[in-house]
Image (spheres, helix red, strand yellow):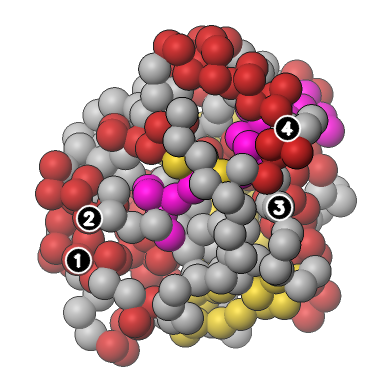
Amino acid sequence: MSFEEDGSGMSTNRYYRDQRAWQDLQLFLPERLRLLSAEQFPAEDFWEWEGHRVHLDRYRNTSASARVVLHHGVGTNGRLLTLILGAPLAQAGFDVVAIDNLGYGLTDVAPGFNAGYRDWVRLVLAFLAAEAKHDPRPTFLYGLSAGGMLTYHVAAAAPRGTLRGIVGMTFLDQRVQKVVDDTSHDQLTARVGVPFMRVAARTPLRRLRYPMTLASKMSALANSPGAMKVLLRDRTSAASWVSVKFLAEYGSYAPLVEPADFDACPVLLTQPAADRWTPYELSLPVLDKITKVPVERVMLENAGHYPLEEPGLTQMRDAIIDFIRAAR
């Protein structure tokens, strides 16, 4: 097993304009999504929360009818969501913000702080509350990969009316053994490593950091070999290391409201049809139990887990726009 001591959490680059990874990744996107003009870049903003400096990609639109908050998974970051979804939604007229959560992207974690998955949920809840104080417009939350289930965990914990709808690329309940088996790096990790992390998290070992490339099936993040080379070199996304505490909490988190009782807001699944990491059936243990609110399911043709391909990218954009317009 590969571990490293918990670092300071400080980002090497302060702004994405100084980072190469996302710029290199653009070359694997359809031409319409290559943000080659500086006029198309989002504003880079920071939000101070509990000693952390949280990086935000923003497309502000004071006349927009709705706000969309984007959240990455365990192999991406906010800028990678801006590329495939943030910019298209902004062009469609929405106010859009993509968050870098603790340990990912260009967010600076407070010195000495050991971030867990529960902190991810707390951060998003706090951000939504902070935004609503000065801007009460209808808000929708989108999550890619592990971010999909995070949208559910946030919606289940948020005060009623906080979110008008949630969208997930997948909804993975890591308490389900098949989900763990199919999304972990290998069976040994799923059956031995995951239980070990839960035990270790109750000891001083909780601060040790572990590469997500060994914890998960990160090799299936993108279907393009060239894109994978870029992603696996990027410590702010696919090459990230997380704490034992994070992995333990991620694998055991229980929502405040279970799916059978969830009635907070409508749900949309945008499932890549060519996903080699988290296929459609892994979301069914969550979605099939949600019956008190509408649940829509859209398959994205030809798209991989981190979708780079058409027509899936266009289908994702259109499905989310239709969902927002119907629910706002």
Q: CA distance from mark 4 to mark 1?
A: 36 Å
Name which residue lies at 48% across and 63% down. Answer: 105
Region of the chain picked out in magenta, as a range: 236-259
According to the picture, the residue beneath numbered tag 1 turns out to be: 24
Q: Which mark is residue 201?
A: 4
Who is closer to the viewer here, 244 or 273?
Answer: 244
Element on which disc 1 rests: helix
Q: Residues within 10 Å of mark 3 (few under 14, many from 20)?
A: many
Sequence-first disc among 4 and 2: 4
Q: Quadrant of residue 123?
A: bottom right
Query: Disc 2 vs disc 1: Cβ atoms closer than 8 Å?
Result: yes
Residue 62 percent coordinates (x, y):
60, 84
Amino acid, disc 1? Asp
Q: CA distance from mark 4 to mark 2?
A: 31 Å
Sequence-first disc among 3 and 1: 1
Who is closer to the viewer here, 220 or 185?
Answer: 185
Residue 107 percent coordinates (x, y):
57, 69
Residue 96 percent coordinates (x, y):
52, 70
Name which residue lies at 29% across and 66% down. Answer: 22
Sequence-first disc among 4 and 1: 1
Q: CA distance from mark 4 to mark 3?
A: 11 Å
| Of marks 2 and 3, the one in the foreground | 3
Res. 239 visible in picture: yes
Q: Which mark is residue 317?
A: none
